[in-house]
Amino acid sequence: MPAAAGGAKAGGSPVDRFIGAKLAAKGLALAPEASREVLLRRLTLDLTGLPPTTAELDAFLADRAPDAYDRAVTRLLDSPRYGLIQTGSCPDIGQSHGRLATSAANTVPA
């Protein structure tokens, strides 16, 4: 697809075209589109806190269907790992300063 103002795809979304035009007016451009491997890695890290497994990555890269990314999102949202992240049940080393928060003040009643 040919590039539009600011590096936005000519057939891209209205938001992409709007942002592309604003960037072009300032002499800037959108970052290049990420590879499929990078997209899955970002998505999986955001939704589960873990990188994709080799099998997940291989399956995604082999799937050339137009809705492959949408199905990956759905699969990850249905994953128990996503639920752990959303409920705060997964220990976050960055926020716990290297120790697991196990005091009564930091637990959620069952």
Image: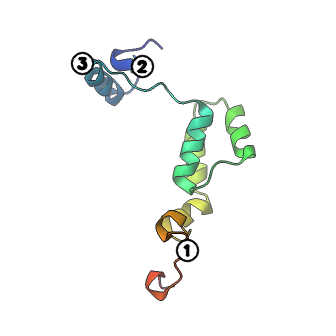
Q: Residue at x 73, y 38 (%)?
A: 58
Task: Quickly name the residue at label 1.
Answer: 99
Q: The disc labelled 3 sits on which kind of residue?
A: Ala
- Alpha-carbon span between mark 1 and mark 2: 46 Å
Q: Nearer the viewer, residue 78 or 107?
A: 107
Residue on which the image places disc 3: 25
Residue 40 in the image: state x and y as whole percent: 59, 41
Q: Which numbered disc, 1 or 2, marks the residue closer to the eye?
A: 1
Give coordinates of residue 91: x percent, y percent: 55, 69
- Between disc 2 and disc 3, the foreground one is 3
First in sequence, mark 2 or 3: give its number: 2
Coordinates of residue 31 in the picture (x, y in percent): 43, 26
Indicate whether 14 appears above or below 3. Answer: below
Q: Amino acid at mark 2?
A: Lys
Residue holding disc 2: 9
Q: Position of residue 106 (x, y in %)?
A: 46, 81
Distance, label 3 to label 1, CA atoms, is: 48 Å
Q: Which residue is rendered at x = 60% and y = 61% of the image?
A: 81
Q: Residue furthest bottom?
A: 104
Marked residue nearer the N-terminal end (1 or 2): 2
**Residue 97 versus residue 79 in the image, above or below:** below
What amino acid does circle 1 point to? Answer: Arg
The mark found on residue 59 in the picture is: none
Query: For numbered disc 1, what is the local secondary structure?
Result: loop
